[in-house]
Image: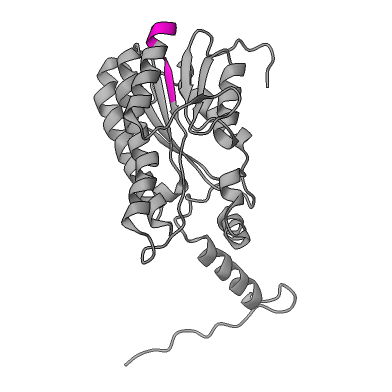
Amino acid sequence: MNDLRPERLVGKVVVVTGAARGQGAAEAEALTREGARVIATDVTEAPGCRRLDVTDEEHWAELAAEVRESYGQVHGLVNNAGITWRARLDEVTPDDFARVHAVNVTGPLLGIQHLTPLMPPGSSIVNVGSTAALSGHYPVAYTTSKWALRGLSKTAATELGPRGIRVNTIHPGFIETEMTASAAPAFREANIHETPLGRTGTVDEITPLVVFLLSDESSFITGAEIPVDGGLTAHGGVKSISDALAVTTARTRPSPIGPPARVSPPRAVG
């Protein structure tokens, strides 16, 4: 990092949800380092975080009123709060399905509705999606919620663009956090196998992108969807096929030592 580079977010007020730990905490810290006045929020009681249940409209209304009174405006919103539920299609209940969508989709919607009236032109919203939103990932409640968030982001980018407010979505792959740590070891191993870079990611590999999208450096970027996944979604699910064929080809490839294999000429027909 160039220590002589001026802080990019000086004078900006940014709200970050789900900021008590993991990726949200790292984002709040990075934005603060870049000069932003960060309002870190979380549903849990945590040091340095204002309590906010993203599914509760009254909580958002209270936060918006506080921001208006204290700062007059807000320049950025990071909809980072999210939950997962790993039940499969034939196991998920309607209640669990609705609960996941309430946090992962309704939460960002309420944040956008309540904070954009305080946003001047040049403001930016970053919605945190997932590679599940780019695939048919098996946890149906989580996957469909992140697909829905993509739709919300596209609509918001279109609706808010004329007001100079940008909306972009990032799609992290397997990032080492408490949420991913709760998954089965086989899930982690499978992700590494399917990731061309051959490893998991860290929160510190997500935060620079969030800072960039909230800064004026990305002033002509809106409606974008950016995977941060080590190439996981780049191959469209064919990495395993490619790897299998590579092994097969290596086993059947002629040895470079010795005469070349003879190829019979085509037989005449007729």
Placement of 95 over or under 203, stated as above or below = below
Placement of 85 over or under 17, stated as above or below = below
Q: How is the image coloured?
A: one colour
From the top left corner, tell me how far across and down residue 127 is, in percent.
Answer: 41, 33
From the top left corner, tell me how far across and down residue 7 is, in percent.
Answer: 59, 12
Say if residue 222 shows up in the picture: no
Quadrant including the C terminus: bottom left
User: Along the horizontal axis of the image, is 254 left or right of 167?
Assistant: right
Question: Which residue: 68% across, 22% down?
Answer: 1
Number of callouts: 0
Question: Which residue: 68% across, 11% down?
Answer: 4
User: Between 248 and 268, which is closer to the camera in this rendering?
Assistant: 248
- Tell me if residue 69 is in the magenta stretch: yes
From the top left corner, tell me how far across and down residue 184 is, in percent.
Answer: 59, 59
User: Between 76 and 233, which is closer to the camera in this rendering?
Assistant: 76
For residue 204, what is the image quadrant?
A: top right
- Tell me if residue 234 is in the magenta stretch: no
Placement of 200 over or under 237, stated as above or below = above
Question: Which residue: 47% across, 18% down?
Answer: 14
User: Along the horizontal axis of the image, is 89 left or right of 206?
Assistant: left
**Residue reaching furthest right?**
257
Where are the magenta residues, as a range? 68-77
User: Along the horizontal axis of the image, is 165 left or right of 3?
Assistant: left
Question: Which residue: 51% across, 66% down?
Answer: 241
From the top left corner, tell me how far across and down residue 175 is, in percent.
Answer: 58, 44
User: Between 234 and 265, which is closer to the camera in this rendering?
Assistant: 234
Say if residue 112 shows up in the picture: yes
Placement of 17 over or under 99, stated as above or below = above
